[in-house]
Image (spheres, coloured by chain):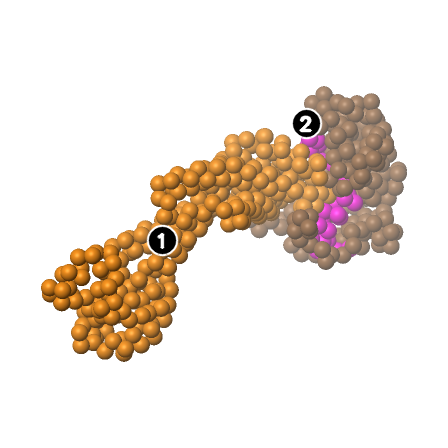
Amino acid sequence: MSYHFRQALLAMRGNFTATLATLVTMTLTLLMLGFVLLLTLNVDRTLGQLESQVEVAAFLTPDADDAGLLAQVRALPQVREARLVGSDQVLEEMSQTSPYTRDAAGLVGNPFPDTLRMKVNRVEDSRTVANTVSALSGVDGVEYGAGYVDPTVKTLTAVRGAGYALVGLLLLGTLFNILNAVRVAMYARRDEISVMRLLGATRAFIRMPHVIEGLIVGVLAAALALALLTPAYLALAGRVRELAPVLPVVTDADTLLPVLGGVAGLGILIGFLGSLFASRRYLRELE
Amino acid sequence: MVWAMLDRDHEQPPVFSLCMLRRSGGVIQFHSVTLSYPITGTLALDDVSLQIGKGEFAYLVGHSGAGKSSFMNLVLKRALPTRGEVRVAGQSLKHYRGRRTALLRRRMGTVFQDNLLLSHLNAYDNVAFALRVTGVHQREWPSRVTAALRTVGLEHKKYALPVQLSRGEQQRVAIARAIVSDPPLLLADEPTGNLDPENSREVLKVLQNVNLRGTTVIVATHARELVESYRHRTLTLRKGKLVRDDPYGGYAL
């Protein structure tokens, strides 16, 4: 094994540019992947928090069938919880936040209608539920905080999607780089490989240094990516917490370690599988 | 596990051994073998049938393009016959695939016109390379490599790099590498092609010594004076056809 390891190191030194290109691309891919995964983790947690807070409110007309409407909205699959709040109770609540509301009601009567308040399963469902409920007979209007929920959900989903697309492209780039690095290394060794074949070396023996090379590059890229990503993320998380304490930023080790470990493992796996595939393919080409 | 993943073929016939050589009628058997290259339309071998027995020394002679190298490539399984069958030690080569082909080649020493020595390794390491790639334990290397170098008369130059050796000496190192695994069969394709007459004779003497140890030796050559001087069975190829099989030697094209 020490022979194969030595050959792998010699191949890496001999084809330094190709090896460096692979290492840089793979590190960037893992960094990007780690970033997207951590972002997703935080987005999911933020959306979860929004979900627990966001309500869809439907204002009913005076002649509406309150009980019937309540039963109808409860039957909607996206609705987790629904309750009917009478106009008196709404006035009571509003009076607590705006003390002059009760005085105004004394002059012109209670201006608040009976209201259906609904909680949805996923925050993305708010718009659908609002549209469905507003179409029901006896519903005068609907509010669901679309002003901030919709753009937030859209932006975060778009960022997450773009991130995954970028990671996909980078993974492809990394694979091509591995193929290229192994190809260059094998062509540099082609005389030796030709002698090996004649002497009766097995394919495994010939391919082993290149597979080890892929593993070494994978391990180095994983180590580099983690060394850059971990402190950068923790620093950024600290800043976000200072600036926006309401955001539930993930910093606990139990959640972060599996994600970072997964990123490192993927790097090593890509290095291994890429070089396994490349060495097989290019050995056939040399035969 | 990685080794298993890298090697894909496991279900194969046994690689030939000395026992199999004893059982089989000949080390090498060609039955109506034709080899053509469809891309160039070349007919390299045309309906060749022959048998070379254990312990024989045989020349394969013919002009360039007569089919000598094609013969060697078929035995080494670097090419497959278009028609007919090639058997080595009684086993048809069509049964050998992947790992078994590698194991088959371990039982054949090969020497080529271009000696294919690795330029960054000295004579000792070049010879030991054959043991390394075939998985022989390192503690066996010194005795076996030294013995092989002694056979070719180059024990005193074991630390010399190929560039520090004459062409004849380089070819002798290549022979040492071919015999260090003690193969039952040695194939030499134009081993004296790049050598002057004196070095050519040296190389041929070494090949004869190897043959005297019981190894079957097949030498493809067009060096008339060597074939005439050191007489052995001579197979003559012309345009892919076996036109003469002279058991007592002689060069007649």
User: Which is closer to the viewer, label 2 or label 1?
Assistant: 1
> Which residue in the structure is indicated by mark 2?
B120
* Neighbourhood count class around disc 2 (C-alpha, 10 Å): few under 14, some 14–19, many 20 upward: few
Colour chain A is painted in:
orange
Q: Amino acid at mark 1?
A: Thr
**What residue sits 59% from the left and 33% below the top?**
A12
Q: Is residue A276 left or right of residue B162?
A: left
Label at residue B51: none
**What residue sits 24% from the left and 70% below the top?**
A86
Is B67 placed above or below A122 here? above
> Which residue in the structure is indicated by mark 1?
A157
Q: Nearer the viewer, residue B223 or B120?
A: B120
Q: Nearer the viewer, residue B178 or A242?
A: A242
- Write the start and end of the magenta stretch as one range: B91-118
Q: Nearer the viewer, residue A63 or A187?
A: A63
* x then y, percent, for residue A270: 54, 46
Is B193 placed above or below A53 here? above
* x then y, percent, for residue A284: 60, 46
Q: Is residue A97 left or right of residue A246?
A: left
**Was residue B139 drawn as part of the magenta stretch in this picture?**
no
User: Where's the C terminus of chain B, which quadrant?
Assistant: top right
Say which element carries label 2.
Answer: loop
**What residue sits 20% from the left and 57% below the top?**
A99
Colour chain B is painted in:
brown
* x then y, percent, for residue A121: 37, 64
Q: Chain of mark 1?
A: A
